Image (tube, grey):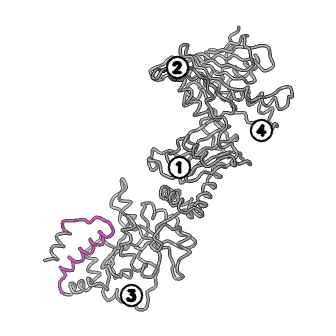
Amino acid sequence: METKQFKAESKRLLDLMINSIYTHREIFLRELISNASDAIDKIYYKALTDDSITFEKENYYIKILSDKENRTIRISDTGIGMTREELDDNLGVIAKSGSLNFKKENESKEGHDIIGQFGVGFYSAFLVADKVTVISKAFGSNEAYKWESKGVEGYTIEPCDKDSFGTEIILKIKENTEDENFDEYIDEYKLKSIIKKYSDFIRYPIKMDITESRLKKDSENEFEEYVEEQVINSMVPLWRKNKNELKEEDYENFYSEKHYGFDKPIKHIHISVDGAVSYNSILFIPEKTPYDFYTKEYEKGLELYSNGVLIMNKCSDLLPDYFGFVKGIVDSEDLSLNISREILQHDRQLKLIAKNIKTKIKNELENILKNEREKYEKFYESFGRQLKYGVYSDFGANKDVLQDLLMFYSSKEKKMVTLAEYVSRMAEDQKYIYYASGESNERIEKMPQTELLLDKGYEILYFTDEVDEFAIRMLMSYKEKEFKSVSSGDLGIEPEENEKDSTLEDDNKELFGYMKDVLKDKVKDVRASKRLKNHAVCLSNEGELTIEMEKILNSMPNNENIKADKVLEINVNNEVFKALKEAYEKDKEKLSLYTDLLYNQALLIEGLSINDPVEFTNNICKIML
């Protein structure tokens, strides 16, 4: 027996492997099981071209054995095995992949999808093991060999006995340290959970001896333990099954098993793509928001598999933020992974998959909106805000994707409507899509600013989410119709002949000027209102910043004293206006009192706080005396 040294670069790579490349120690089992699966695949591919080899799948499996007493784990397979030379070449030179070479030699054969790429996965065993032993007998050979290493010191290869072809890897698990509990890797239930997490869809059975308990014979309360060999993995993933064979309950069960949520999904999308990039996917549109969905703690992303092996729990690059509520998996052979398989390289294939998934989700949502309106409204109640954030983010870059999915409450229909539905009902003389912002539909319905529009029969959209106005500012228009707030200084409505014209403003210029002087910089102007019918007063705004936006921005951390340009509008057809004119002519002090009261009244209508509540109540008392 000769001790061989790893090459200098292999020593450095092995040290890097143990200390840096992998972020989770439990990855070792995924890598070793993937290698075992590759070894069985190789016999399958040989059987395709060699009639003397019969491949009966039930004879091929992977077995995991845990020995707590001796602190060992054994991973054995009934695969192709390795000769002495292959042990030396494949395990003596780190980053030389026997599976990759095999794949290149056989890439003309249909259906090849061997997992191995880099030849480094085997060495992840040293994350948890002090010593690694490999016993292997190559298919068709009469000789078996043992490869053994304790890490960077080197390795030995010597003949040994083995009855059947295949490979057995024995890991001598490290002792616990202050920072690491290695005992968990010899616990059968921990091993079982790791297999289910990463290797559930390996195509061959992964067997383990599991300790179970049962009632003793002829006993009512005494239990005994027994060991039973169990197949741990599911083998055939749902996404690789024929859609025609699956029922809705199969998808719902998968959703539940994957712990995607306690609800039932509103819709599933089953995708199988062969083309520039090939992949399978199952996506779910949930019914309800997770409790942490709108928090920093929530992680969006899809589970990512390569050939049925879990690579990432949450691949955020596969979903745009505005579709972050979607759950599901993607499985592809074509992805370029980094050396540890834990992180994707940002390549063309990934972008193609992400683009295709975005289109599939959008089309499915549009389909639900069109054909299952009640179901869509239920979805929108949970995730509509996220779509609106999507319009607002990235400076409106996503508006073309999302605008037809948006819904708002309608003053006319008394229910949620789309922008397309609103525009289809617009009057011929209507220039704008009108909206009103407020805390609730009930509050908006009472807004004085809506009177003129409603009187003319115009439909108003109600904005009750804080993001609504900001999103609409990014959208700017829909089907060439601009959006206009009911509080805007100019509503774009031509006055009718019997309505008060601009001379009314000129006739009362001095009165309004005096009131503006009383309010000083609190308002930009005081003027006669063209929108009020019954209410005495309201506030409108000029400029891009609306009053509702002012409220929202000032409620945010580190924002204060942000002011919209407010205009105090007076209804000249209201009895209050007569009182103002009389006070202007006879009692300027009373006019100042009236002005302050009307301004504060307008603030309260808008849901804004008044500067001095005590002064306001005292002024009311003065009026009553």
Discs 3/4, front: 4
Q: Which residue is mark 1?
A: 264
Disc 3 marks which amino acid?
Answer: Ser
The residue at the point 61 percent across, 41 percent down is 304
Instruction: Where is residue 314? Give x, y as percent.
Output: 55, 42
User: Which of marks 4 and 2 precedes in the sequence?
Assistant: 4
Please tell me whether mark 4 or mark 1 is closer to you in this view.
1
Q: Residue 126: where, in percent of width, then height?
A: 59, 21
Residue 590 lies in the magenta-colored region: yes
Residue, x 65% and y 23% (percent of image)? 63
Query: Given this view, does label 1 or label 2 mark the residue nearer the observer?
Result: 2
Q: Is residue 392 visible?
A: no
Which of the two discs, 2 and 4, sits closer to the camera?
A: 2
Cα–Cα span, label 4 and label 1: 35 Å
Q: Which residue is mark 3?
A: 502
Tag on residue 217? Answer: 2
Query: What is the crowding at mark 4: few (fewer than 14 residues within 10 Å), some, or many (at least 20)?
Result: few
User: In the orientation shown, which residue stands out farthest toward the top?
Assistant: 1
Is 69 placed left or right of 469 in the picture? right
Looking at the image, residue 412 sits to the left or right of residue 245; the answer is left
Which percent across, then down, holds residue 116? 70, 31
